[in-house]
Every structure is written in structure tokens, then in C-alpha cells.
Image (spheres, helix red, strand yellow):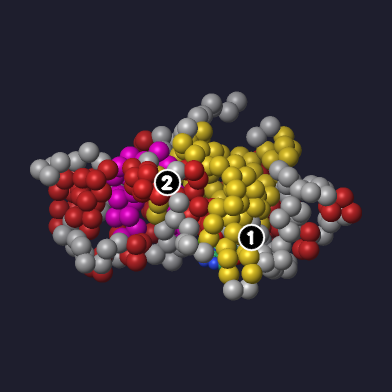
Amino acid sequence: MMAPTTDVLRVEDLSVAFQTRGGLVRALDRVGFTVGAGQTMALVGESGSGKSVTAYAVMGLLETAGRVTGGRAFLGQTDLLATPPRTMARIRGRRIAMIFQNPRAALNPIRAVGKQIADVLLRHGGATRSNARDRAIEALRAVGIPDPARRAKAYPFELSGGMCQRVMIAIAVAARPDLLIADEPTTGLDVTTQAVVMDLIGAMARGSGMATILITHDLALAAERANRIAVMHAGHMVEEADTATLLARPRHPYTARLIAATPTAAGSLASLQSVPGGLPDLRQADRLHCRYAGRCERRQDACDAVLTMRPAAPGHAVACWNPL
Ligand SMILES: Nc1ncnc2c1ncn2[C@@H]1O[C@H](COP(=O)(O)OP(=O)(O)O)[C@@H](O)[C@H]1O
Ligand SMILES: [Mg+2]
């Protein structure tokens, strides 16, 4: 039986469009998913499928070219998409935190890392002038940085990429957020450091009941680290299920292709196949119909009907007219 969880974040029908010189790009259309307390939900899909745009829209951080054209994103009772920017600025940092690829670029290059953590603790973490420094050092110790009192004085350029990501994690969890969004947090790190960083994120989540959205193009990483997986393709959500179910019994042909394209420890190079065809042009892409049809070997006439996510089994949803 599944343990009951409360939803920390519930995204419904999220649509985002970008105004570009080449026309309107419908980057997201009616995307929905939920993340429960203490759970890790992985958003998975090829590059360009809309994972980061989903995160940025939820955080209220879309660039000016991008606009939310519909939907809701409830953090508890608060619809983030209907929240004014000044209130959103407070919610970010305090209730939602985010870590990115390339942590060194996300840190302030001219401020010692201990001070950067202390800043967040003072602003959002209930620290006082007198204890902020000690708490920052404690936070560095908690993310496994050796000799934290000395490292607190270091600048980002003096630390490795893995150390910088640990600092980012320390900053992210300093305010004890309800939700952590990790967008490709280990891309660009070496394999050993990747595992260390993912272990750390997992430990932070377990210790605090924090919900985590893990954004990755790497299905193997999602399979290893997430309780649930949501698969995106060309701005549509195509399948969502708990990790074991999704891997053992994918219903969407695209999910099945992604699984087949993912090298496993047991798999050989010969069994590697990539997903054929490219993402459709999002300027021409149909909002309401299947955007995978052009690449799909299971396409049939019924696929011309308007598409929605439908339950395939309890806790398992799929957007496909001819599922596996
Ligand atoms: N600033 C932008 N201007 C125009 N289109 C954008 C912009 N940012 C993202 N997009 C569109 O949204 C799509 C999804 O982008 P993104 O969410 O970054 O993909 P990923 O899944 O790799 O994170 C892109 O392929 C692009 O078409
Ligand atoms: Mg991205």
C-alpha cells in the first residue's frame, strides 16, 4: 500500500508561450503533476521538452518573453501563478528553493561562501547577527564540506564544482523550504561527485519532509533517485507513474523508447537505441493533439482526437490514444 502523502505542489493545466521573432512558441501546454511531502518527483524528457520552463514558470522566474497563458500551481493553498511578483520573491528562498546546473555561476563570485549562506539564514532562516556565522559553518559541515570554518572564507573560484554544488545545497535548504527544485543538478560533475551530490539532496529531503522536483534528461538518474517520474515530450506531459511501475510497464510509446535508449548496468552498447525523429517545431506544434504522432510507430487514425492525460491504472496516467 502506498503511504498517504500530502501534496506540497499541485500543478494543473500549466501553459506557457514565448513571443519570438519567428512567432509564438507554445513551450508548455496543459502540463500537470503533483509532488508529495518527502517525495522526489523526476521531470524527465529530451532537451527542449519543457522541463526548465515548467520550473521557471512555477517559481515566477520566466523571462519577459515568456508568459503563463493558463493554469494553476498550488503550493499548499497558494496559487503561485496568481501571486504578485513581490510576494513570489518572498516565497522563493523561504518556501521554494532551487539549485541549478553550473553551481559556480549561480554563486556570487565576489562574496565568501560562508557569508552567502549567512545572508540566506539572516533573510529566511531565522538567524541573528550573532549566530549567522556559526550557523553558516554548521550548514557547510552538514553538506559534508571538510574544515568548514576555513572553507567558509573561500570564494567560489577557490572551490571545485562539487564543493560549489554542496554550497548551493546548503543555501537552498538553509530556509527549510517546503519544495526544492533541482534542475540538472549533477550535469557537468564527474560521476563520483554526481553520486555524492544526489545522496546529499536525498538526505536533506528525507530529514525534513521537503518535496523535491528532480529535473533531468537522464532517465537512469531519475530511476535511481525518484519515487515518481513524469515524462515530458515537446511541452506536453505524456506519462506519470511511480518509478517502479513506469519502468516495468510504460504505457506511452515515447516512455518505452526512452527506457530502451537508457543504458543500464546490465545493458550492452549494442542494445542502445536513441529515440528516432526530433522534437516538433513548437511554433507549429498543435496545442491539443499528440505531439509525438510524427515520431510514433503506433500512430493510428484515433490519434487525431484531442488528447488529455487519462488514468491507465491507479496513480498511473498516460496521454496516448493507442497506449502499450
Ligand atoms: N527564452 C525563450 N524564448 C523562446 N523560446 C523558449 C525560451 N526558453 C525556452 N523556450 C522554448 O521552450 C522549449 C523548452 O525549453 P526548456 O524548458 O528549457 O527545455 P528543457 O526540457 O531542456 O529544460 C524550448 O525548446 C524552446 O522552444
Ligand atoms: Mg532545462
Q: Tell whether circle 2 marks a residue whose Cβ is less than 8 angstroms from ligand 1.
A: no
**Residue 63 counted in the magenta span:** no
- The residue at 62%/64% (across/down) is 25
Residue kind at label 2, given as amino acid type: Pro
* 70 on left or right of 215: right
Q: Quadrant of residue 32?
A: top right
Q: Secondary structure at mark 1?
A: strand
Q: Which residue carries the number 1 mark?
A: 26
Q: Tell whether circle 1 marks a residue whose Cβ is less than 8 angstroms from ligand 1.
A: no
Outermost residue, bottom side: 21
- The residue at 10%/43% (across/down) is 130
Q: Secondary structure at mark 2?
A: loop
Residue 195 in view in this figure: no
Outermost residue, left side: 130
Where is residue 62 drawn, in percent x and y?
A: 48, 58
* 124 on left or right of 205: left
Where is residue 314 drawn, in percent x and y?
A: 68, 32
- The residue at 89%/54% (across/down) is 301
> In the image, is residue 117 above or below residue 109?
above
> In the image, is residue 187 above or below residue 96?
below
Q: Which residue carries the number 2 mark?
A: 84
Give, as a single range, the part of the protein colored magenta: 164-186
Residue kind at label 1, given as amino acid type: Arg
Residue 165 in view in this figure: yes
